[in-house]
Image (spheres, coloured by chain):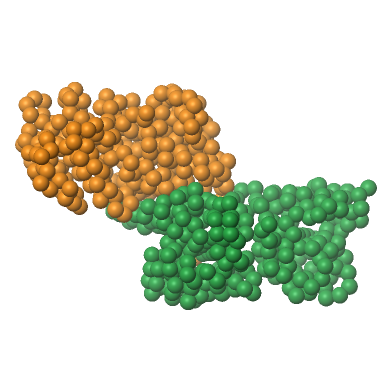
Chain colours: A green, B orange
């Protein structure tokens, strides 16, 4: 019998995971929704934040008494669950690193090409049944600034490099001698990089240091040809400032997959801002993703049961899994 | 004085090239439109087919008497100018190999990702101000059949490989030991490759052997998940058969950049076929392309003037520049 016998796994989520069958006989699995979470947290050894869009954990995390020793979130970002009490205690937090990188990199590459080649213009012309040849942008040789040097930012950068784009990767602190990107720029280099950018891609974690990073001043540093893409978290961008930059032709276009408030309300003014492409927080969500997330949690549960180190341990003070 | 003094260069095109200044003092440059072409051809040593969409050369090529010794076309395909008389005589034909490969490869990669990630669905939902999350396709690990093993097909294949797609390249004849693709499949292998394809990309030259290659039988060989892209020439596809395949859900989607008749008429039924993306023959035409084409012709004129071998010599019987 493993030492985890008697372990209680609490799953937060109205849609339960597709299957947690590898836990059968090894753990008691109970389910919580946002209203029952606070009452059940003291009974659980492990919390699986399956509904990663919920802010309930932050509100319900016990300030004293029994609590889960391990929290796993089925997302890359941990901004929705970290709170001072959880940061302060010795509960381990792990994330879904490994599931979303490649899909998000593909998605961003597609957006970049779609904007370079004016697919949106072609589609509108098709609706109007109009044949109107245009000259578009050659991607190779253009320059991208990718903000976020974690696995997602790196995958985006790698994919853009493969398309012939010059990539400047920006992280929290400078790292020299990166095998793929040479120098990883520190965050305070961003201001000097933005004026040269054809593409600015935001894939940073949401932390106190990055909230509102893309504001009026940042958009003013970009050249008029710049296109901005956010696949990180909504609050990294000051949406009003982006709208102002687009309406004032300060930058050429933007694509948002994440928003300050999700889902975006039907009456949001964002839907019809010119040159703004909107998608519903789906850049990383490819067919089978929920199965992959459930497998990943169970792999980590195997580690936990065997008393081995967990994978994807978040540095709770930084707010992400540090790159080695 | 070079031996080309006294050379007459005839340019076919209503929009003349941006600049042919490197010919100044070295050649007499005269211009023809479709109606004056036949009368001027006997006076020219060199013909520049700048308007590469015209069929006029085929009709006007002299069957006897003086004629250009060299024809350069500002396009990759030579299907519009080759005719039995031109094939039979010793006039050299050169093309624009080198200008379009990378832009077309980028364009195709963009279409592939746009279809994988349902950008078109997202755009329609944005118009309707609807937030509707969907799971989309992970590109890496899917399989593409690229028909056409010339420089454009190879560039498309290389770009898809970089995105993690498995690529089967199909040429006229089998070539083993290709450094990038391993085996280049012969054309008669196509039938066996189509059933495994997630993506079928047509980038073949238009010749007697390839005309109508993608017909009802070919679409029937593709699986229902297949998406078809044509960036070659319109008549490679039997358009009615493609429409039937799309309307009958035999394949999932298609994108056409080239058509049997261009420009596509406003009343063409193609404009609103479901899951058919239409663009106006622009996949290779990036900003500065006309300058690049003019430079390329002038580079070859330097070769001609110096009595050196011309670049990009078309095998007139094959209908393209053979890959070494």
**Residue B274 visible, this angle:** no
In this picture, is B52 found above or below B86?
A: below
Task: Name the residue at 49% across, 71% down.
Answer: A191
Q: Where is residue B231 in the image (x, y as percent from the top left)?
A: 37, 41
Q: In which quarter of the image is residue B90?
A: top left
Q: Quadrant of residue B73?
A: top left
Q: Position of residue A247 (x, y in %)?
A: 40, 73
The answer to whether B73 appears left or right of B146 in the picture is left
Task: Name the residue at 66% across, 52% down.
Answer: A98
Task: Name the residue at 10% across, 31% down.
Answer: B67
Q: In which quarter of the image is the N terminus of chain B?
A: top left
Q: Where is residue A54 in the image (x, y as percent from the top left)?
A: 69, 67
Q: Position of residue B282 (x, y in %)?
A: 32, 48
A138 or B1: nearer the viewer: B1
A61 or A262: nearer the viewer: A61
Total numbered labels:
0
């Amino acid at each position: 019998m493993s030492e985890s016998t008697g372990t209680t796994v609490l799953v937060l989520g109205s849609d339960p995971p597709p299957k947690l069958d590898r836990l059968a006989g090894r753990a008691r699995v109970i389910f919580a929704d946002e209203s029952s979470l606070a009452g059940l947290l003291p009974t659980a050894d492990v919390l699986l934040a399956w509904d990663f869009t919920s802010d309930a954990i932050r509100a319900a995390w016990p300030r004293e008494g029994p609590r889960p020793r391990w929290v796993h979130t089925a997302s890359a970002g941990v901004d929705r669950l970290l709170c001072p009490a959880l940061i302060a205690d010795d509960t381990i937090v792990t994330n879904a690193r490994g599931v979303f990188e490649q899909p998000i990199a593909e998605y961003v590459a597609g957006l970049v090409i779609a904007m370079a080649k004016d697919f949106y213009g072609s589609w509108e012309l098709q609706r109007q049944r109009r044949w109107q040849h245009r000259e578009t942008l050659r991607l190779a040789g253009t320059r991208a600034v990718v903000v976020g040097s974690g696995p997602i930012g790196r995958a985006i950068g790698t994919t853009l490099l493969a398309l012939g784009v010059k990539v400047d990767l920006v992280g929290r602190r400078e790292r020299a001698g990166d095998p793929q990107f040479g120098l990883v720029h520190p965050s305070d280099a961003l201001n000097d990089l933005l004026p040269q950018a054809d593409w600015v891609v935001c894939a940073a974690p949401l932390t106190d240091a990055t909230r509102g990073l893309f504001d009026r001043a940042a958009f003013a540093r970009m050249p008029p040809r710049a296109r901005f893409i956010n696949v990180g978290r909504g609050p990294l961008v000051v949406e009003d400032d982006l709208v102002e930059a687009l309406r004032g032709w300060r930058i050429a276009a933007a694509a948002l997959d994440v928003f300050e408030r999700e889902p975006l309300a039907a009456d949001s003014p964002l839907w019809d801002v010119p040159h703004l492409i909107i998608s519903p927080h789906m850049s990383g969500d490819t067919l089978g993703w929920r199965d992959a997330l459930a497998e990943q949690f169970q792999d980590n549960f195997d580690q936990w049961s065997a008393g081995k180190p967990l994978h994807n341990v978040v540095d709770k003070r930084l707010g992400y899994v540090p790159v080695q």
